[in-house]
Image (cartoon, coloured by chain):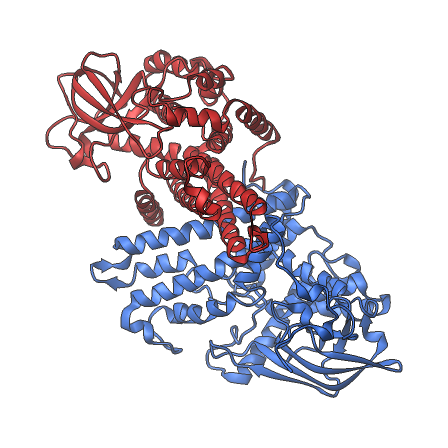
Amino acid sequence: MDFNDTPQEAEFRKKVRAFLEENAEKRSTLAAKPNGDSGSSISSAGAPETVKGEDAAKVALENAKEWQRKKADAGFAAILWPKEFGGYGGTPIEQVIYAQEEHDYFVHSGYFEIGIGMLGPTMMAWGNDEDKKRFLPKMITGEEIWCQLFSEPSAGSDLAGIRMKAEKDGNEWVLNGQKVWTSGAHFADYGMIVARSDPTALKHKGLTYFYVDMKTPGIEAKPIKQISGSANFNEVFFNDVRIPDSQRIGAEGDGWKVSLTTLMNERLAVGDPPGLDFDQIFEASKEIEVEDGLAVKNSEVRQKMADWYIQSRGLQYTKYRSMTALSKGQTPGPELSISKLVTASKMQDVSSYALDLMDMSGMVHQDKNPILKNLFQNGYFFSAAMRIAGGTDEVLRNIIAERVLGLPQDERPDKKLPFNELPSGKN
Amino acid sequence: MNFDFSDDQKLLRDQARKFLQDKCDRKSVRSILENHEQNYDADLWSQISELGWTGTAIPEEYGGLGLGMLELCVIAEELGRALAPTPFSSSIYIFAEFLKSYGTDEQKKKYLPLIASGEKIGTFALSETNGKPKPNNIKVLHTSGKLNGSKNPVSDGESADYIIVAANSDNNSNYNSLSLFIIDRNDPGVNISNLDTIDPTRPACTVNLENVACERLGEEGSGWDMIDDILNRAAVLFSFEQVGGAQVSLDEAKKYSLERFAFGKQIGAFQALKHKMADMYVKIELARSNAYYGAWALSTDSNELPIAAAGARVSASEAYNYASQENIQIHGGVGFTWEYDCHLFYRRSKLLSLNIGSIRQWKENLISNLEKRNIV
């Protein structure tokens, strides 16, 4: 039992470290951003403080693209992808090692992760050679950004409940409807979309998968302002959007099957969960005074912090167990689904408790907050979203119960009826 | 990265599991639970001693197998799964570890072979009263080579042949006045009376000492340091027992939820129960991972041990307490009957989370060790 890399892994880690040290800036514990860099969330973080609003977003995007180019030149932008598309041709353990090392640096890879992590692999599995050659290399370099147009107002946890219409007209498809929660739709160049091509078929059988140029007439992205005040997601409206049949990925009616490739790749992302954790509140507790002195000396605070420590380290060591499986060439189990479930609630507990420790100052939430730079205020808002995005706590518990423990599925009326006969709560 | 047990260790685990399924079924656990005359399963004890489990981590020169602490962790998990009613933890995780770390060569030669062979049983007596043992509530006194006072509760005291007793050397008890002494329970001044415990398969007693002859273990005045060290080591082993018991609690909850029908379907299909079992699973996996880290620190004599041990201990105690409570809940009415086995785990989990110090104390240990590391 040890934590040592194999000689090959150690060699790879050395290369990654050298690259990061040369090209990126390291961060400290208290500076860890509550929304992290490794998730799919995208914000104006990375822009100088003096730049505001849209300009800040543009600067951040340019900075991120510049970083992505460097990463691609060094070969680290898509570690799992084959070399023919500009990838590193690496192993899952190398992917994890890279993510581990990059976690300690101020870099912004979020813009590209959906493309490289999920959509690219879908195109590799289901797309034609011409498209692969045309799109995949530019996905890696960050030259073209992709977004994932899956969720809809009535298809969230129940993702297959998609209502976006895809109607065939000669050699074209006409798309009508609305997508939502689309990260980066307002700056993405392309998107992958699932739409309902046959409402009379069973729910999972009537879907078809496409890619679209986001500049196609009839597509309109509107940012959704979130609880945190920032807008990382969009509503995307499709009004008579015409696309050629050549932009279909997979067969007509196979949209759900193709989507599963995308979604399974989401589950392979084993990066470090975002920051705001035990380490941050432990540091903060050494600065905040409570009724009987420093918070770190208060027995109730210590008891609470111990809970978060064992969750935090428990997840870290669980990841080591998964890495061990990967290192031996085995597939880690769905145990990985516990990570976000635990992390999001922990972040909410930690941030809410920290605000309480700050007492009246906990109310203050502005850029120049002298106290701990808004770390916990931001976390308080972000964690509420994190418990929902990418699978709600409840869906994750269902996944653990059904796929890990083998408990029965709920009764599913939607598996027996054609989609257009399902109760929807709407007339 | 190889954060896992080796193939040999996994083989040992499989063999131990099979052996215990056969020799330590629920019927034999219940026979100890229901028979107040018997403190432990003597047949099982002699069989696991014959297999060498008691000597797993004791060096060959002192009669053990000379395997490592990782092998002992593997066995601990299996003993926990089986609810084995034996004094294994007192004698092996604690008494033997004290001797290994702090005994003179002469003491090791005298005691360890007898402990390794299972012929004799040892335990440790610290607590005297309600609340956390600390300098001002240890009243057992060492004067002119004799011990006087009373220890309460002492795990496996009635089964023990030897007891390590924590005693103060002057009336002005402070952190540096505590020393450890080994006594022979056959000394005429030793008077033992059984106590009922929340889990009668893991008994405890009061030990009264009246001018009892003793030999010192380790340096005079360094009692608390030695106790911290050995209880850290024991905490890792206990955490494996706890993870083992927690896992079986979840497995049995799941099994019942698939057999029991209500409202026309398996109760395991209700989300309220599925989510509860998912939460049990999450706590157990985190506890298992924390225990693995403890095992790594224990087996490599890492200076991370105090943190790793406390993390493992807290995580495993909470996971087992939760799993055993919710196992009863999922069983519904039959869950709180004597007939169903749920209460065996409910008893054992709480007892294990107390017997080397409460969750509360271990959380405090965890944070204070993290503070120390930070300063260094």
Q: Is residue A213 left or right of residue B78?
A: right
Q: Is residue A277 left or right of residue A58?
A: left
Q: Position of residue A352 (x, y in %)?
A: 37, 66
Q: Position of residue B42 (x, y in %)?
A: 42, 17
Q: Is residue A274 left or right of residue A305?
A: right
Q: Colour of chain B?
A: red
Quarter of the view holding residue B46? top left
Q: Residue at x 42, y 24 (%)?
A: B31
Quarter of the view holding residue B337? top left
The chain drawn in blue is A
Q: In which quadrant is the N terminus of chain B drawn?
A: top right
Q: Position of residue A38 (x, y in %)?
A: 56, 63
Q: Nearer the viewer, residue B45 or A380?
A: B45
Relative to B80, say whether A79 is above or below. below
Q: Residue at x 85, y 81 (%)?
A: A172
Q: Residue at x 19, y 22 (%)?
A: B208
Q: Nearer the viewer, residue A190 or A247?
A: A247
Q: Position of residue A18 (x, y in %)?
A: 59, 55
Relative to A132, say whether B257 is above or below. above
Q: Does any portion of residue A192 appear in the rendered image?
A: no
Relative to B80, say whether A119 is above or below. below
Which residue reaches farthest left? B171
Q: Total number of numbered labels?
A: 0
